[in-house]
Image: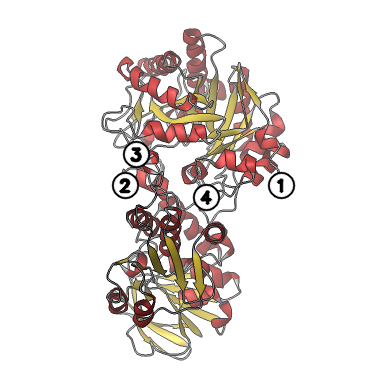
């Protein structure tokens, strides 16, 4: 299927984008201490420009001094930042992309006590913010305009005024956040005064033809927040002010319109927001941001008139060549919408990372050096670690043979991609299989590797990537036939007998398994020893949606509960106060974690002079860690 609509040029004011693909603004977790553009950003930007993106919108730049120090933003609020901004713009322009600088302020959602239109308590504020005075608001407007001037002076083609995610500009427009009764609040016209005056001031400083885009939340999951009708009014007002596009996003909703849709959300669910605007606003390009990862789906959105452009974010982290590959029909390394990238930067305040792309913000290190000595390499285990190490080593010129005990590649990706809401993981599994199929790696399926086989083959290098075994429950009845592991339940739900199912373990795997079996018509309960489910490696933008799905499915959750005994058709649990209860359980599913079989791994490694172990058989972790370690080893062999 071609992507004809996606690759049509589009006019943005005085500019023309070569296609309908915009790179969504994304923080990289670099440079926030001094707010300067850092060296690692340049190859990152150049690679996305080289990859064919039409419009690259920068991560958010601080536009005013009215923010808390130490926020997660680069600086544009002082002239001293201009040299760095020039480097940033040049990197985007290097291969023909348009460069827009996003200007913003966090507002009441700032870390610590921020500045907002009104000093109110809101579920969306960690701390009650300070209300801006009218004089301070005038300063803020002037600061934003000066940031626009700096963007123009630095070589950016335009700016994007950030009014989304209930940050400062969005707070002024929202009846939920703006409770003022002066010239900057009250009715619609006064709530719109700040963004309108910013646009007018930028045009006064930069010329009426300097392009300004506008990003805003076309849905707020807040009492008296922005909904569809008000979103249309806001977008039309900004269109009348001469913005060259409207970039529609969602604010704070984790379920209906999640701001960062995870794998549990239907794909492109935010397209309803851009579609609503398209129905009412003519002659203004509308950008759809919807967690878009599939170019064909993006093409349909544009072809059906639901948007004029698509904002592609996480998919461009996973594969910077996403546009070029889409145009040429080449296989794309898929984003799985795991949201680790956002979690790394915004929650734990570290450098960004991608589960499937180990060279994100290390693009200069990505090229592979040919091996000086060609070796025979034996890789045992075909999970993500084994597959990726095999691919990297083979591409460097080694002779690689990949052994898998089962009759299909993928390891735990196979059961992990079975539920329909894990479709994105299934795409990754198919990608890995296709990459192996196109490679020089020799694959041996249905072949269990034992130390004697290693000694017989005598590889130059052995790589053990056999994964880990599920932890069993050491309680009376724990070895009963109706007790099975989560991976077996996911791989074949026919293994789950009876109507009543108890899932032991309220982590991600346990909750996903419970949701999947509930969808198969089972009555499911989850038992978790900790005080809440989804506490370990919790990524809130994912777990909040999963929690909502569990509630919707009416799955019973029992926290602070330990399993005491497994009976024939029930389990006995005790809470932290010692109170006991029985839960019906025709089948019991174990999802209490994995444990490496270190003895087996050591025996295998001892059979070869040069051997390595990677992945879960060393330390059970996520796909992210498995792929990163496999990539590192593949380059060292």
> Marks 3 and 2: CB-CB under 8 Å?
no
Q: Which of marks 3 and 2 is nearer the N terminus?
A: 3
Q: Earlier in the sequence, mark 1 or mark 3?
A: 1
Q: Residues within 10 Å of mark 4 (few under 14, many from 20)?
A: many
Above/below status of 163 relative to 467: above
Q: Mark 3 points at which residue?
A: 29
Q: Is residue 528 left or right of residue 185?
A: left
Q: In which quarter of the image is residue 10?
A: top right
Tell me the quarter of the image containing the C terminus: bottom left
Residue 148 horizontal/vertical position (percent): 44, 17
Q: Which of marks 4 and 3 is nearer the N terminus?
A: 3
Q: Residue 333 carries which label?
A: 4
Dot in front, 4 or 3 = 4
> Marks 1 and 3: CB-CB under 8 Å?
no
Residue most extreme to the right: 304
Q: Distance between the residues labelled 1 and 3?
A: 37 Å
Q: Distance between the residues labelled 4 and 3?
A: 23 Å
Residue 400 horizontal/vertical position (percent): 44, 64
Q: How far apart are marks 3 and 2 (CA)?
A: 10 Å
Q: Which of marks 1 and 4 is nearer the N terminus?
A: 1
Q: Is residue 280 left or right of residue 388?
A: right
Q: How far apart are marks 2 and 4 (CA)?
A: 26 Å
Q: Which of 288 and 5 is in front in this view?
A: 5
Dot in front, 2 or 1 = 1
Residue 143 horizontal/vertical position (percent): 38, 17
Residue drawn at the location 58% of the way across and 28% of the way down: 246
Q: How crowded is mark 1: few (under 14 residues within 10 Å), some or many (20 or more)?
A: few
Q: Quadrant of residue 37?
A: top left
């Amino acid at each position: 299927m071609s992507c004809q609509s996606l690759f049509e040029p589009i006019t943005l004011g005085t500019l023309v984008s070569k296609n309908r693909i915009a790179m969504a603004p994304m923080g990289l977790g670099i440079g926030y201490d001094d707010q300067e553009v850092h060296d690692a950003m340049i190859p990152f930007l150049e690679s996305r420009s080289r990859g064919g993106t039409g419009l690259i919108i920068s991560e958010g730049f601080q536009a005013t001094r009215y923010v808390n120090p130490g926020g997660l933003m680069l600086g544009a609020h002082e002239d001293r930042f201009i040299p760095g901004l020039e480097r940033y713009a040049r990197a985007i322009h290097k291969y023909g992309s348009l460069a827009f600088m996003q200007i913003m302020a966090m507002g009441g959602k700032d870390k610590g006590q921020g500045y907002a239109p009104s000093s109110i308590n809101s579920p969306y504020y960690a701390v009650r913010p300070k209300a801006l005075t009218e004089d301070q608001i005038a300063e803020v407007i002037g600061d934003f305009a000066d940031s626009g001037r700096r963007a123009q002076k630095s070589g950016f083609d335009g700016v994007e005024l950030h009014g989304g995610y209930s940050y400062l500009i969005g707070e002024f427009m929202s009846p939920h956040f703006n409770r003022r009764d002066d010239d900057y609040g009250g009715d619609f016209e006064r709530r719109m005064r700040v963004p309108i005056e910013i646009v007018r001031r930028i045009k006064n400083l930069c010329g009426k033809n300097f392009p300004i885009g506008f990003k805003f939340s076309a849905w707020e999951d807040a009492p008296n927040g922005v909904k569809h009708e008000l979103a249309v009014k806001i977008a039309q007002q900004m269109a009348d002010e001469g913005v060259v596009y409207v970039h529609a996003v969602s604010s704070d909703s984790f379920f209906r319109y999640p701001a960062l849709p995870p794998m549990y959300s239907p794909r492109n669910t935010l397209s309803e927001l851009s579609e609503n605007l398209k129905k009412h606003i003519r002659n203004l390009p509308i950008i759809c941001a919807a967690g878009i990862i599939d170019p064909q789906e993006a093409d349909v959105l544009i072809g059906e008139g639901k948007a004029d452009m698509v904002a592609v974010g996480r998919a461009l982290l996973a594969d910077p060549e996403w546009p070029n590959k889409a145009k040429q029909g080449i296989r794309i390394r898929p984003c799985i919408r795991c949201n680790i990238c956002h979690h790394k930067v915004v929650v734990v305040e570290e450098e960004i990372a991608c589960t499937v792309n180990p060279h994100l913000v290390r693009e200069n290190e990505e090229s592979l050096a040919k091996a000086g000595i060609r070796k025979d390499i034996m890789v045992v285990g075909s999970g993500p670690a084994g597959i990726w190490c095999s691919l990297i080593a083979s591409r460097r010129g080694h002779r690689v043979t990949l052994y898998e005990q089962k009759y299909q590649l993928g390891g735990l990706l196979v059961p992990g991609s079975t539920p329909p809401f894990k479709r994105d993981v299934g795409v990754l599994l198919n990608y890995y299989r296709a990459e192996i199929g196109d490679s020089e790696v020799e694959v041996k399926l249905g072949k269990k590797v034992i130390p004697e086989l290693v000694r017989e083959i005598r590889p130059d290098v052995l790589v053990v990537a056999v994964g880990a075994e599920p932890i069993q429950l050491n309680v009376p009845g724990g070895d009963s036939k109706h007790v099975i592991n989560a991976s077996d339940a996911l791989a074949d739900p026919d293994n789950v007998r009876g109507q009543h199912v108890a899932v032991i373990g309220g982590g991600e795997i346990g909750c996903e398994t419970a949701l999947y079996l509930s969808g198969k018509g089972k009555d499911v309960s989850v038992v978790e020893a900790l005080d809440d489910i989804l506490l370990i490696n919790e990524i809130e933008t994912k777990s909040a949606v999963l929690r909502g799905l569990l509630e919707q499915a009416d799955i019973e959750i029992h926290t602070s509960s330990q399993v005491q005994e497994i009976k024939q058709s029930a389990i006995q649990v005790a809470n932290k106060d010692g109170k006991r209860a029985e839960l019906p359980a025709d089948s019991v599913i174990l999802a209490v974690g994995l444990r490496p079989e270190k003895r087996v791994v050591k025996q295998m490694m001892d059979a070869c002079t040069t051997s390595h172990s990677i992945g879960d058989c060393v330390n059970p972790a996520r796909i992210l860690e498995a792929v990163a370690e496999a990539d590192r080893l593949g380059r060292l062999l």
